Image (tube, helix red, strand yellow):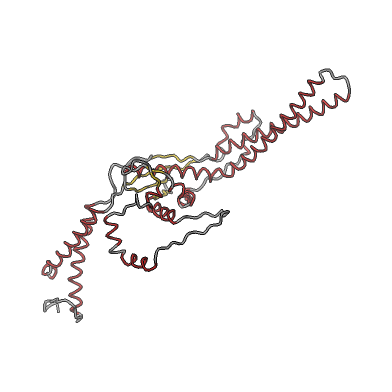
Amino acid sequence: KRLWDKRKLILIVTGCFMVLGLFVALFSPKVYTSSVTFVPQSARKGASGGLSSLAAMAGINLGDMASAESLSPNMYPKILENIDFKKDLMYSKIKFEEWEEPITLIDYYTNPEYNKPSVLGIVKKYTIGLPFVILNAIRGEDTTSVAVPSENTLKYYTKDEFNCAMALGESIYMMLEKKEGYITITTNMSEPLAAAQLCQITFDLLGKYVTEFKIDKAKAQMDFIQSRYDEKKAEYEKKQLALATFQDANRVISSAKARTELERLTSEYNMANTIYTEMAKQLLQADIQVKEDTPVLTAVKPVAVPYKKTKPQRAKILFIWTFLGGILGCGIVLGLDWLVGQGINLPIKWEVPVEEK
């Protein structure tokens, strides 16, 4: 009955909140969401067993090859936070409908020519965020730059890169479904095509970095064997040429000295040939190991251009704000009645029924 008596106030508060909700719903920027769901796969230990019979013909024992452990999917979100990953991503170009030429993400998020604030963003900045605007104006703009020596090997962000990295952190999400064994990458952008492009670029970069981390050890070993192989190959060819030259010059060997020289050259050639052949086997083995350790990200739900926007949900926003306005209106009535009942003098005129007092 009390709320019914004060229905005019409640309706006024509810109406104000409804107008605010309508404003928020109309001027909230559009957000389109694209996603990709994939299953991280890698060759299992012993997967090279099928090649054993073929490799045995070349004298290679694949059974002795120890497959590296798979990179845990729990580490994938950490890769998204990697500074090199973020920099590769922010300097990737994306085509937006608003501009003819593709632009980099760092320009999109930091360049005033592309990063224009929305109406709602301006209102929030000078209402809720007004204290921070005043505080920043008092402090002054931070013009401090990162002083880095010319030979420094440490990684760092510039101011624009840091702001872009923060924006990307709010636009890209990764969800790990440990029970089902799949991972989902979700991206949010202001345009449907841009959201799909960002999702695809993130997925491709993730595959690149996972591969690099996974086969780093095997690749280093292969590079080392490759360099030794090149050395032994050159040495083998040198010994081969020396033996052939001697044989051409001594077609008829009649002296013991010449036979001894021929035996020495033949022995050196055979030794070089044996080492060269063994290095070729090891190089082939290392190459197989690299390919076996290379992980594969299998997309079970590939990237697609979203058809409908995900935000703002205008009807939902309007309902929530209207509902909150009604709750607040009822709370104001009951709260003021309680304050008057406690004998507190209010700056406004507020009458409470006698029975309530």
Q: Residue 155, image x and y in percent?
A: 52, 54
**Quadrant where the N terminus lies?**
bottom left
Picture quarter containing residue 69?
Answer: top right
Q: Nearer the viewer, residue 5 or 91?
A: 91
Q: Reply above or below: 89 against 63.
A: below
Q: Reply above or below: 54 against 76.
A: above
**Quadrant where the C terminus lies?**
bottom left
Say which residue appears at 82% left-offset and 20% top-offset: 250
Q: Is residue 326 left or right of residue 114?
A: left
The residue positioned farthest toward the top in the image shown: 252
Picture quarter containing residue 258?
Answer: top right
Say which residue appears at 79% left-offset and 22% top-offset: 247
Say which residue appears at 41% left-offset and 40% top-offset: 299
Picture quarter containing residue 96?
Answer: top left
The residue positioned farthest toward the right in the image shown: 256
Q: Nearer the viewer, residue 10 or 149?
A: 149
Q: Nearer the viewer, residue 177 or 291?
A: 291
Q: Reply above or below: 350 against 241.
A: below
Q: Is residue 348 left or right of residue 48?
A: left
Say which residue appears at 48% left-offset and 41% top-offset: 41
Q: Residue 218, image x and y in percent?
A: 59, 42
The number of callouts visible is: 0
Q: Residue 153, image x and y in percent?
A: 56, 53
